[in-house]
Amino acid sequence: MATSPFCNRNLLGLSGIAVSLTLMLGGCGGGDEAPSNTAGAAGSSGLTGVGGTSGAGGSTTTGGRIGSGGGGSASGPVGGTSSGGTSGGASTSGGVATAGGGAGGAVTGGTAGSSGAAGSGGTSSGECTRELLDGMLDDYFAALSAGDPSTLPLATNVKFTENAQAGQLGMTEFWKNAGDTKYSQRALDTTACSAAAQAVVPESGEDLPIGLRIKVVGGKMTEIETIVVRPGDYTASFAVDSNPAAIIDIAEDIGWHDEVPQAQRPTRQQLTAWVDKYFRAFPSGVCNVTSACRRLENGGGNFSCGTGASCSASTPTTGGEFEPRVIVVDEVRGIAAGFTIFDFQTTGHLDMHMIKMSGGQVHAVHAILRNTNGQSGWD
């Protein structure tokens, strides 16, 4: 099936006399390649002569994104003096790249040329962007595959949980044995500066469905929540076997990363309200689903979204079956991801539901669930 026209991967290169800046934007359709840091070449301007020096190219990364820039250079003709241009490495913070570095002035008549003006963007920005969040997920999956979290932009007080257990990032069995991520579907919430993903990741050669949530503050990861589902971890009496391959197989039909056209795009309130009602009115909160909507549980089942459920016209009040603890919302893609404890006829499962909505209707519901005896690690 052809790649969606809404899914783009862009590479932007800016080059000039005194500035070299490369900014890589995270892709879609999974976007599992990890970025690399690239130092800028030195800028140049003016006449080149003997004895000139060149400003150093700088490279700074904050928040896991790429910034690079070259300093200016200037040199005088034989017998003259020279001054180097202002060095200006690019600065990035919060995923926004800014150019730096001014050009050294040309030298004429044996006198020293003036250094160039400082490049624009010498300051950093704390803006939370879709590129930042997508890049954080790229960086996380790359570090997971390498078994080395040292490359991640972690806050000093970062909290990490795996299957409701708080621990040290990089020290779990999954972190020690995970391979390259095969697929991920993502929600990028710039309002809450959070990202959520459902993914297929091999552990010691066996593909597993996983759920992931990352909270970002000031370009640093402050919360990392993971759900790793191995065979036998979904223990409800009505549980189906995991089928990670189905998560990948059905993805193009759903178009998780397709941007929803403006006329059909759900609001943040619509997405939040749907997930909230789904959980708190369960099993009578499954409303506005298409006839083609399918529900997967750890990739298994492939049920109609309405199977075993109904739709109540009333809005849930405080309380209800399951309280949604976190809801990550991506209006652009029409995705919401809700986290709760699912304990309907179970011993209590850590649960991440992801939905795709457009035109006021839900087209897919995918759940990642595993038994944690009613614990989330975040209460």
Image (cartoon, rainbow, N blue to C red):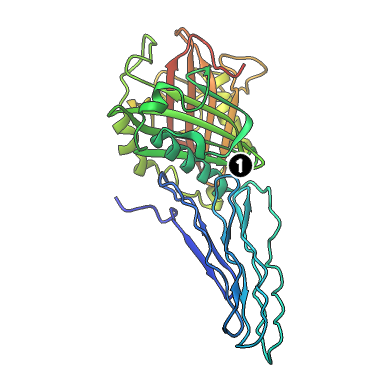
Q: Is residue 4 left or right of residue 328?
A: left
Residue 365 vs residue 121, the one in the foreground: 121
**What is the tally of numbered marks visible in this picture?**
1
Residue 365 at x, y percent in the picture: 44, 31
In the image, is residue 350 above or below residue 27?
A: above
Residue 132 at x, y percent in the picture: 56, 47
- Is residue 304 visible to us here? no
Disc 1 crowd, CA 10 A, few/some/many (<14, 14-19, 20+): some
Residue at label 1?
Answer: 267
Residue 67 at x, y percent in the picture: 57, 56
In the image, is residue 77 above or below residue 35?
A: below
Identity of the residue drawn at 30% across and 32% down: 246
Residue 234 vs residue 221, the one in the foreground: 221
- Is residue 44 visible to us here? yes
Identity of the residue drawn at 41% across and 32% down: 147
Report the residue that reaches farthest toward the left: 205
Viewport quadrant of the C terminus: top right
Residue 183 vs residue 282, the one in the foreground: 183
Identity of the residue drawn at 57% across and 83% down: 50
**Which of the 4 quarters of the picture holds residue 329?**
top right
In the image, is residue 153 above or below residue 208?
A: below
